[in-house]
Amino acid sequence: MICSNNDPLVSVIIPAYNSEDTLNDCIQSVVCQSYENLEIIVVNDGSRDNTKAIIEKFSSADPRVILVNKKENEGRVLARDSGIKNAHGKYIQYLDSDDTLRERAIEYLLAKAEITGADMVVAPFLFHLEDGKVERSLNFDFKELSGIDYLKAMMTGKAYWCVWAKFHLRSLYEHSIVCPNISLGEDIILSTQLCFFTKKVATIHYEIINYNFSSSSTSHLDNFDDAKYEDFRVYTKWFNDYIEQSGLSEELRKEKAYFHVRTVQRCFLGKQLVEMDREIKSLVSEIKEFPCLLKVLSKRERKIVTVYQFSYWLGYLNLKRYRWQGKL
């Protein structure tokens, strides 16, 4: 696809830390896009391997590839922020260094954004699992939504929180967007704010990214250690405070209840008994108002909550029993 001077610039931002094994394929997938008016900002986040050398190889061959070099590793949140500060495009597309853009992804995303005037275009993607299987992501089918309505879809599990599946205007960052430097839940915080400032969301049905899901992924349930649990506490508090301060707490009441179910499920992973007890008690009152929430819970979780519905005291004793038996 040959671009003219009137074609909008798209900024692709790739945070990279010790990514020598995957970065070559990642950058190559962007360089080879059919839409060529790109700036490919690769942020070397203090890597100690050959990550920087790989970026320099591409930048010397293609002036669209721009190296942002950080001497110290500060995490993906601050790496993305460095990318935004160096971006000049009309649109932003994030990409993780172990994933790849699929052929013509930018072309399709941009066309949809320009035709509809959408601030954000969302798209499905492909899960590439460690056993070699490839699965298609959930595809939330709609024509156009407001940013708040799309936020509701994410809160109720109909759509994904991941920011790299959201092609969006760089001008959204002219608003006050902040994100704590955490490694779990950062996409929830950024996606929430982007949706608050988005007037129109459109979608395409083409899978734009090959997402490599591995057992070492920060989102993998087996990696929910104490540090991740602390990040979980940070982002859930931030999210609840942000919704409250927005003035939309009442409008998002049902969606907040669904989000709270996910909070309780994370508490089970963290195995923090006191916090689990507190969150389950709060959930019981929400289930009274929205009985459909029980369907979101697993069979084990429903059993625990059912005892709490009968008696908080018995519920807590039952919770302790589950923990003693190693069933949490």
Image: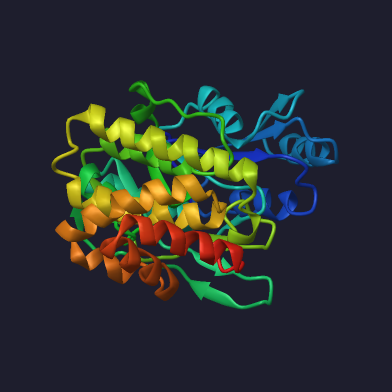
Residue occupying the far right of the picture? 49
Residue nearer the viewer, 126 or 306: 306
42 above or below 281?
Answer: above
What residue do we see at 27% from left, 35% from top?
243
Most foreground residue, 235 or 53:
235
In the image, residue 55 sits, relative to residue 151, either above or below, namely above
**Residue drawn 30% across the image and 53% down it:** 283
Rendering coords of residue 252 (x, y %) = 19, 45
Q: Position of residue 228 (x, y in %)?
A: 59, 44
238 lies above or below 127:
above
Residue 163 visible here: no
Q: Is residue 56 left or right of residue 172?
A: right
So how many labels did they put on this image?
Answer: 0
Quadrant where the C terminus is found in the figure: bottom right
Q: Position of residue 48 (x, y in %)?
A: 84, 36
Q: How is the image coloured?
A: rainbow
Specify whether residue 176 is in view: yes
Tell me residue 177's x, y (percent). Answer: 39, 26
Q: Is residue 97 toward the left or the right of residue 101 in the image?
A: right
Which sits in the foreground, 166 or 185? 185
**Residue ID at (36%, 54%):** 280
Q: Nearer the viewer, residue 19 or 314?
A: 314
Residue located at (77% from left, 23% from top) = 71
Q: Kindly indicate the quadrant of the structure image that contains residue 65.
A: top right
Quick check: 240 above or below 116? above
